[in-house]
Amino acid sequence: MLSVSGLTKRFGGFTAVKDVSFSVEEGEILGLIGPNGSGKSTTFNCVAGLYGPSSGSIRLEGREIGGERADRVCHRGIGRTFQIPRPFRNLTLLENVALSAYFGQGGKVDRAQCWRLAEQALDLVGLPVDPRAGTDGLGAAALKKLELARALATQPRLLLADESLNGLDQGEMEGAADMLRRIRAERGLTIVWVEHIMGVLMRVVDRVVVLDHGEVIFSGRPAEAQADRRVIEVYLGAEES
Amino acid sequence: MSRVALRPTRGIPPLAWSALGAAALLAVPILIRYGAPGSERYYLHILIQILIWSFIYTGWSLMGRFGLTSLGHGAFTGIGAYTTVLLWNVAGLSPWLGIPVGIGLATAAALLVAYPCFSLRITGHYFALMTLALTEFVRLCIVGWRDYTGGSLGTQPQRAPGGVSITALQFEPDRVLSYYIALALWALGLWMWLRVDRSMDRYALDAASQDEEAAASVGVDVTREKLKITGLSAAMCALGGAVYGQYQMYIGPDTIAGLGVSLNIVFGTIAGGLSVLLGPTVGAVFTQLLSEVLRVAVQGSGLTAQLGSAALALDTAIYGALLIFFIIYMPKGILGTILEARRRRRAGAP
């Protein structure tokens, strides 16, 4: 569904991502992991259109999307969340999500329909607070849910979840993982989950791609990753010592 | 849970109040005729000025409320007014055609400056400075092209025979007619404001004013949305400027173009309330009454003798001081603050 090949992104003299290639199959949950600074967020942001790649290609269902603007990428069917939630604090929860439903589909949908889609998306992520409330009273977990609801409201076929469960407790992490699984089941979505904590992710994803210093060092099944020497070295090594 | 905005919109007074208000406004000329027979023209003049400036302020607030602080609107009112008058004076083109041309030119100028700003993500102070440059550019053009524009002294539309003329769109001698024209313009402004407020674009612009990248990530074409509102805002100000010129039967670089006008628009709108329907109107009442009071006070005192024409700049100085006061102590403006206080009281919050 998504294929990234030879992706390189340089910021001035610094190469954040070097010749990264991987692909995502329809219907799977792919984990994109790596320690801080490994280039996963940069890769993610290149796919989502926030950065233009320096070289390489990004194809969604065969069509090149590398270098397209973020709003166009969204219209093509890629929804994203931000690692640190970026709610529109001057709007209510429902407005946050409804505008995503409207503009995420290129403004070609009925307005009444957008409010319904927004309510559905809020239901799906389980945001039980008053949808007409503002975002001020929300905690970290609820803000992440709002991010997810906004991305889902754009009716994506591919969801890029910059989850980073840092800051959530064990129960909330499990909840977030379950939610991604449930969303795939209900919506038939393909999901790329970016994360730097391995624990919970490994039980949910079908495959993992591990990045280190901007390069892919492993690609395969989660169980194999946990046994891979290089992965353990650069990634888990620090945790075990 | 503070800001509980109601869907689909907020800030519309109940229908009954609107109808009552409309009836009262329509009846004003009659009330003045019987209430103040001697000074009918004077009171109507003040009301007409308030209504026209309310329309211009409302046009500015359409983009100002989304954090797009433009100091370029003095250019748009100027382009609207000067294009209309010059086409009439030089080419004999009726304002009915001249005004659309002026609106077109002002919109084009707005988009020309705004497009690079928006696509290069120039926001905040830098956007204000870019638009400020546009204002100064237009003023210099007016002053420099003095054979046609009258330079810094300004110029007048050639009077159509008979005073009131439909083809020349001249209505100034008939103050009651002028009042109704200004009232219609003002109502058009409110209607535009409501249309924007109820549109999905409003949410996109609110979102973009908060976080452009996040807005883009949910599919908002941020540049396009901002250009749309900028174009609309400039067009409204050009129309307001043109009507102002037709009513005053005089246009000058200080009265309808230039930085003074830009600042007056910004100040008036912020003073009244940037993001409520009638905020700009309250702002216009405030600025027009203020300048009228100051004018009378200055003329009545010995100040003019001592300061000469510099006394006329006194109101600008006081505007400046008040602007600082409003930005610091009353950022929601007069009406915004009142509405908020009333809402708090109703909600029973402390």
Image (cartoon, coloured by chain):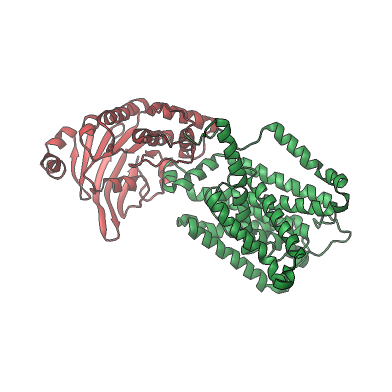
Chain colours: A red, B green
Give percent across and percent down for residue B261: 64, 60
- Residue at 40% over, 38% down: A77
* Left or right position of A233 against B111: left
The answer to which quarter of the image holds residue B86 is bottom right
Tell me: residue B256, above or below residue B236: below
Residue at the spot 81% in from the left edge and 58% down from the top edge: B168
Residue B84 showing in the rendered view: no
* Viewer-closest of B270 and A218: B270
From the top left corner, tell me how far across and down residue B43 is, in percent.
80, 52
Residue A21 drawn at (x, y percent): 24, 46
- Place residue B79 in its image quadrant: bottom right
Q: Is residue A87 left or right of residue B21?
A: left
Q: Is residue B186 above or below residue A129?
A: below
The answer, for residue A128, to whether it is visible in the render is: yes
Q: Is residue B36 left or right of residue A90?
A: right
Please report the residue visible at 71 percent of the width from the left and 34 percent of the height from the top: B17
The mark tally for this picture is 0
Determine the residue positioned at 75% across, 46% down. Answer: B183
